[in-house]
Amino acid sequence: MRFNVAQLLKRATGSSRRYQMREDIEGIDPALIIREPLVGQIEMVRTADGILVTGELTTAVELQCDRCLEPFIQKVEFRIEEEFQPAIEMGTGAQLPYDEDTRIDEHHILDLTELIRQSIFLTLPMHPICRPDCLGLCEWCGKNLNEGPCGCQEPKADPRLEILKKLK
């Protein structure tokens, strides 16, 4: 997801380019299991300070359900919007101050990898659930209740706590 933006940096403020993306991003992060390519469209617009990148992107990742612990595929749709600034001045070649994550390197390469990786993580649910009606696991035997009842009987409570049942 690297783009040479030298020509766009030479153009006037407001100039833009559009790109259709279809990228295999498997391996973008060891904690992510990517199941579909990254697909979407991005636009790069020349600003006074650099290049503004915007876009709508989608992919799919494999997650583990918090209730039943089974793996499932989650579609991920997100929007990116970030301004990247060059590390060097186009005309003079002088070094410019820059932020490491949003810089255009000395060879005028703009790399979207870190922005996309962070955007995917921000889009993922904090507690992934495979489906809204997931029953989870039996709290006593651990059987997946989506596959049917387990047949467990509730263990007897501590007799000292029996009084608490009356509080219902």
Image (cartoon, helix red, strand yellow):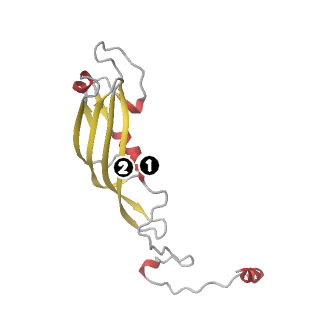
Q: Given contact means CB atoms under 8 Å apart, are the residues at marks 1 and 2 in contact?
A: yes
The residue pinned by badge 1 equals 122
In the picture, the quarter occupied by the N terminus is top left
Percent position of residue 128, x then y: 45, 62
Marks 1 and 2, how far apart at CA: 9 Å
Tell me the amino acid under the disc marked 1.
Leu
Residue most toward the top?
Answer: 92
Place residue 114 in its image quadrant: top left
Residue at 42% from the left image edge and 52% from the top image edge: 123
The disc placed on residue 40 is: none
Residue at 22% from the left image edge and 25% from the top image edge: 7
Compared to 25, does 13 lie above or below? above
Residue at 46% from the left image edge and 70% from the top image edge: 68
Compared to 26, does 6 lie above or below? above
Q: Nearer the viewer, residue 96 or 150?
A: 96
The residue pinned by badge 2 equals 78
**Secondary structure category for the residue under label 2:** strand
Q: Is 133 displayed left or right of 153 in the figure?
A: left
